[in-house]
Amino acid sequence: MVTTFRRCDRILLNNISWQQFEALLHNLGDHRAARLAYDRGTLEIMTPLPEHEYYKEVLSEATKEIADVLERDYESYGSTTWRRQIKEAGLEPDNCFYFQNESKVRGKLSFDLDRDPPPDLSLEIDVTSKSLNRLPIYARLGVPELWCYDDGQLTIYHLCQGEYAEAENSLVFPQLPIRELPQLINEHRQRGRRALRKAVRTWTKKYL
């Protein structure tokens, strides 16, 4: 029996088979606002709010600006649906990046996590609490690093022996105090995106 749990912009469905999850992805297609996450029979469907999308965009832009200043090659795959049937795990991050494994996926347009490496970094924006804990899903997909933004704070997680542990520094940008980014963003939020990107570049150069 399928039950539902509703909280504003999300629906939680229980007893959903992997085949139903795959069928829903197919029927909804790629051009949609809703984001899906699947964890061993539980499915969450979430429609992002404007605040969520703002922080998703500015943190993504900041990551790219930092990479450019540090001359780091990267690939960004947005909210690609990552899934592994054998792990009964699937989700769509707010954004995801390849850095350490960039050369292995450069230019790729399709992925199979049974053969390809998962993203090196994923972003999760939690301006409203999600009903489904995504950390165990990311762990079974094998994503090495997560940045989770919530209420002005950025928490960094590293995957260690199948579980996430909170960390002080980023694996991708170990020389930078990444957890300062929310403060930097809020200091420049009223000045517009171009000013914010310039501020991120200036901030990054301080640590070269």
Image: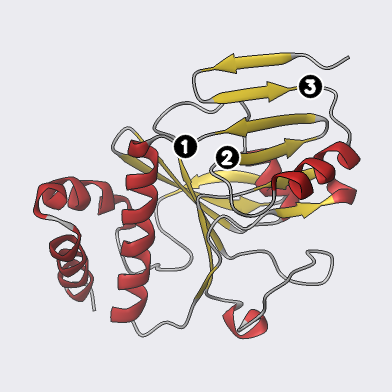
**Residue drawn 70% across the image and 42% down it:** 137
Q: Residue at x 67, y 79 (%)?
A: 108
Local packing at callout 1 (Cα closer than 10 Å; few below 14, some 14-19, many 20+) is: some
The picture places residue 170, in percent across and down from the top left corner, at: 43, 60
Task: Describe residue 80's horizontal placement relative to residue 78 as left or right.
Answer: right
Q: Residue at x 87, y 50 (%)?
A: 85
Cα distance between the residues tagged 3 and 2: 18 Å
- Circle 1 residue: 48
Provide the secondary structure element on which disc 1 rests. loop
Q: CA distance from mark 3 to mark 1?
A: 21 Å
In space, the residues marked 1 and 2 are separated at their CA atoms by: 7 Å
Q: Is residue 71 left or right of residue 35?
A: left
The answer to whether marks 3 and 1 mark residues whose Cβ atoms lie closer than 8 Å is no
- Residue 88 in view: no
Which dot marks residue 34?
2
Q: Secondary structure at mark 2?
A: loop
Q: Which mark is residue 36?
A: none
Three-letter code for the amino acid on which mark 2 is drawn? Ala
> Which residue matches tag 3?
14
**10 Å neighbourhood of mark 3: few (<14), some, or many (≥20)?**
some
Residue closer to the observer: 104 or 93? 93
Q: Position of residue 114 (x, y in %)?
A: 84, 65
Q: Secondary structure at mark 3?
A: loop
- Callout in the foreground (3, 2): 2
- Kind of residue at badge 1: Pro
Dot 2, crowdedness within 10 Å: few (<14), some or many (≥20)? some
